[in-house]
Amino acid sequence: MRMSKGALRLLRPDSGLLVAQEIPSSPPGGFEVVRASHPLPDQGSLQAGEAAMRLIDRLGPGDLLLVLLSGGASALFEASPVPLDDLRTATVELLRSGLAIRDVNEVRKGLSEVKGGRLAERASARGATVVGLILSDIVGNPIDDIGSGPTALHSSRGERAKSILERHRLWDSMPATVQRLLRSAAEAHGVRSSLASGAVYNVIVADNGRAFQAARQEAERRGYASHILTTPMEGEARQAGRVVVSQALRWNPAARSVAVIAGGETTVTVHGGGRGGRNQELALSAAELLEGRPAVLLACGTDGADGNTEAAGAIVDGRTMARASALGLNPEEFLDNNDSYSFFGALHDLVVTGPTGTNVADLVLFLAHRPGRDRRERLSRSSGRGRASPLGSSRSDSAHSEGHGVSVHSH
C-alpha cells in the first residue's frame, strides 16, 4: 500500500493492481484491489494472479509495467495449473520442513505461471518495459528469489525442485499434481520460450541492512554502544538464538550499555504440534542464556507476522526463566513441541503489531547494561501486565556452544 502511494505521487498509471493481506479503507484510485493470504495461498491469491495476467495482456510496445514487489508475494500472488488445495498442501509441507527459503521458492517457481520471471517475460514479449522496485526479505538480496522472482527474467523455473524434494525426503508427501508439474520442470531444464522484445530492470530499494542501520542509529542516539553482529543470519532458529546471545554478551565488555543487532531469516524444522514462528522460537531458545542478566532480547518479523500466529515475534529478558518457572512452564518442552506461541502467550510477552506494510526479513535486537561501569543501574522494560520489571543483576559469562548449521558471520 505504501509503495503504491509513493508511486502515485510521481506517476499517473493507466491501471493498477494492489494485492495485500489487509485492504486499506481508502485504496488508491484506479487500482483493482485484491485481498489475499500469507504464508499460505488462498482464493484471493489466485484472483490476484488472474488480474495481473489480464493487466499484462493489455500491454503493448512503449508501455511501462511497474512492479512494486516485497517478500510474501510468493503466497499473495499466484497463477498455477495446480489446484489450490494441492498448492496449500505442498506449501504446508515446505514450511514445516526447515528448508532454506531459496529451496522453498525453487519448488514454488516450478508450480507457477507468474514466478521465476514468467510475469516479466509475458509483459516483455508484448514489447513493454518492465521495472521492478523490490523490498528484499532474503539474505543477499537475490532478485530471482524475492517473492519467487516474478520479474527475474533469467531465473530458474523449478528445474531443481524435484531433486531438492527427493534429497530432503519430501517428494512422497507432495500431491500427485505437484509431482507431475515438477517432473516436467526438471525435464525442461534450460528450455526457454522465444526471446522477449522489451527491456526488464530490477532495483533493490530497501533491505535488511537498511533496517539494521536505522536501528543502530537509534540505539546510538539513546546512548548505547551499538554493533551490527550479522545480517546473513540463517540456520535453525533455536540454534541461532543461542549463538547471537552468546556473542552479544561478549561484545565490547568495557561498555556500560550495549545494543547488538542481528537478523536475516532463520528456519524451523517442525517436529511438534504447537504454534509459533521462527522469531518466537529464536527468542525462546535464548531465554536460558539471559537468566539473571540485566539484558533483553527482541526477535520479530518486520512484516508483523511470524509463522502460523498473529504475533510478529517475542521478547525475553533476565527474568523470563524465573517467571516461567513460577507458572510451571518448562521452556525445553515448549521448544520440543514447537509451541513457543503458547509459552510467550502465558507470559504476555508476545509482540503483536499487526501488518506493518513492509517486509525486510527479521530483526533481532539485544540490549544490555553492565552494572558497575560508571554507576549501578538496572535495565527495565514493561512487563505483560503493564508495569516496569527490573531485571536481575549480571552474572559471569559462561561458555556456550554455538551450534552447528547456523550461519552467523561478523559484519
Image (spheres, rainbow, N blue to C red):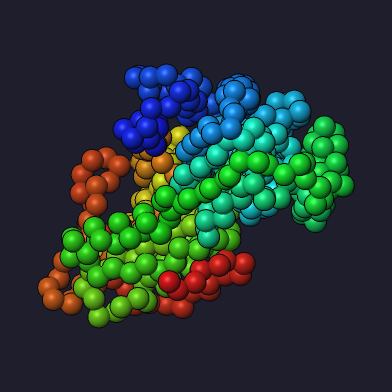
Q: Position of residue 316 (x, y in %)?
A: 37, 54
Picture residue at 57% right of the left edge, 55% below the top = 142
> Is residue 384 depicted above or below 269 in this figure?
above
Q: Where is residue 351 in the image (x, y as percent from the top left)?
A: 37, 42
Direction from residue 378 to residue 328 in the image, left or right: right
Whether residue 240 is visible here, answered yes or no, is yes
Q: Where is residue 234 in the image (x, y as percent from the top left)?
A: 55, 61
Picture residue at 18% right of the left edge, 60% below the top = 222
If the image is split into quadrants, where does the C terminus sit?
bottom left
If the image is split into quadrants, where does the N terminus sit?
top left
Picture residue at 61% right of the left edge, 50% below the top = 144
Question: How many discs mark residues in the rendered view?
Answer: 0
Q: Which of 335 and 181 is in front in this view?
A: 181
Most distant residue in the left direction: 375
Q: Nearer the viewer, residue 326 or 376?
A: 376
Direction from residue 49 to residue 375 in the image, left or right: left
Q: Nearer the viewer, residue 105 or 330?
A: 105
Most distant residue in the front direction: 62
Direction from residue 130 to residue 310 in the image, left or right: left
Most distant residue in the bottom direction: 254
Q: Where is residue 217 in the image (x, y as percent from the top left)?
A: 25, 61
Picture residue at 49% right of the left edge, 71% below the top = 409
Whether residue 272 is visible here, answered yes or no, is no
Q: Which of 339 and 233 is in front in this view?
A: 233
> Is residue 311 depicted above or below 217 in this figure?
above
Q: Quadrant of residue 168?
A: bottom right
